[in-house]
Structures are given as structure tokens and as C-alpha cells.
Image (spheres, helix red, strand yellow):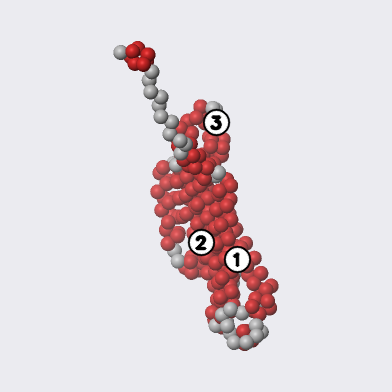
Amino acid sequence: MSERDCLAANDWICAEYVRTRSQELLDATGEHVVIALASVALGLLLAFPLALLARRRRGFAGPVLGLTTVLYTVPSLAMFALLMPVFGLSASVVVTGLVLYSLTVLVRNILAGLEGVPAEAREAALGMGYGPVRLLFEVELPLALPALMAGIRIATVSAVSLTTVGAIVGYGGLGNLIYTGMDSFFKAEVLTASVICVVLAVLADVLLLGVQRLLTPWTRTGGRGRRLRGAGPHRPRPAPSRTAKVKAD
């Protein structure tokens, strides 16, 4: 059976579908990436001050963490339906919903990273004359980067996955193709769009992991350096001389 016949046969894997619908696939992928990235970026801008508020005013920590957790438990279909009266049938519904979902992970990870900064580092910076703003951006945030980047990775992969649900309002990126393909039982459309979505999630996680390793080189060299320093040949302590023994006596 030729490649052209795979469309007529409605095969799951069909190169002819990819060739003839390449522009449609590119447009859907572009929309998917823009929605996912915009939601993570806006979520980070909102989560950062919330985490700082929860950290500086302990009375706000419980309500902030509790609210973000409650938002995360709302099903995506219900969340988008609740936002539609405010934003209408637009991409803002999907972006806003994903921003609210990302807050749970981002706020907790930022807060955990900042609270994990050693007290000695803060005291040393304060002793050198660092003010609160300089202390935050030059000392605390760099040390909190591993936890922060871990939260961004989780939020990004989740956003790539949940963007597909935006197809219910017509702004789901690859989700639009998945839903229309399922309605018409167009196998190649469903499988191709699903595979691209999975590839996007994997690529996003790998790229962010690479950025994390570049920004936090001490997390991969510190332990190794300690192991190398401790792995050298054992040098026995020289035996005390007879004169030293006499002096000791």
C-alpha cells in the first residue's frame, strides 16, 4: 500500500497526512507553545511576590498556600467554564486557567528555595552591608535557583499537557487537532498531534534542565570536588621520633 493510500485507509501512522497538513500542524504547534510559555511566565511573575509575602508575613503563608492548593483541585473543564463569563471565548481563558494552576507548584518551590538558604550566608551578606533588595537578588535567589527551576520545569510540562484542554474554547493548540480527530475518528490526526504534544513536553523539560545546570554549576561540581579531594592516597602520619618521645616523657 502506497503512502497516499494511508489517508484513504485511515491508518494511525500516515506520512502523507504530515506532508499535506504540515502548515496546519505548524500553526497548532505554535499556538500551543505560545499559550504554554505565556502561562508559565505570567504564573512566575505572580508567584514570586506571593512567595515573598508568605515568607515575610507568616500570617499570610497559610492562606496563600491554601488558596493555590484549592485552585489546583478545580477540574480544568470547570475552571475554563468559570473563566468564560469574564474573558469570553478567547485564549485568555486558557492562559488564565493555566496561570492559576501553576501557582501551586511555583509558590511552594520559590518559598522552599528561599527558606533553604543557609542562615550563615544571609548573616555574612548583612555583615558586608547588603540591603534587603541586594540580599534577595544577589544571595538568596541564586542559592534558591535549584528549587525554583524544579518548580518551573514541573509547571511548564503541566502547562504543555493542560493546554490541550483549551480546545473546548477553540484555543487548545494541538488539542484542537486531537479533539477534531477524535470526533471524526481521524487516526493520523489524533496520533500525530498527540506525539507532537509529548515531544514538546520532553523538549521543554530537557531544555530547562540544561538551563538549570548552566545556572547552578555548583550543584554538579561541589559534591564531585569533595569526593575527589577525599579520594587521594592515604598518607600515614609519620611516627614520632625518639627525641620527641623523650620530650613528651
Find residue 55 and report its horizontal and vertical position in percent: 45, 42
Which is nearer the N-term, disc 1 or disc 2? 1
- The residue that label 3 is drawn on is 130
Residue type pointed to by label 3: Tyr
- Inter-mark Cα distance, 3 to 1: 42 Å
Question: What mark, if any, has residue 32 been given in the picture?
Answer: 1
Q: Is residue 180 above or below residue 45?
A: below
Which is nearer the N-term, disc 3 or disc 1? 1
Find residue 31 and report its horizontal and vertical position in percent: 63, 66
Disc 1: CA contacts within 10 A as few (<14), some (14-19) or many (>=20): many
- Inter-mark Cα distance, 1 to 2: 12 Å
Q: Verify CB contact (< 8 Å) between mark 3 and mark 2.
A: no
Residue type pointed to by label 1: His
Say whether residue 185 is visible: yes
Residue at image point 59% right, 74% down: 192
Find residue 220 and report its horizontal and vertical position in percent: 52, 45
Q: Is residue 206 above or below residue 223?
A: below
- In the picture as drawn, the residue positioned furthest to the left comes out as 249
Q: Give the SS element for disc 1.
A: helix
233 vs 139, nearest the viewer: 233
Dividing the image into 4 quarters, which one contains the C terminus? Answer: top left
- The residue that label 2 is drawn on is 158
- In the picture as drawn, the residue positioned furthest to the front comes out as 242
Say whether residue 141 is visible: no
Residue at image point 68% right, 78% down: 20
Residue type pointed to by label 2: Ser
Disc 2: CA contacts within 10 A as few (<14), some (14-19) or many (>=20): some
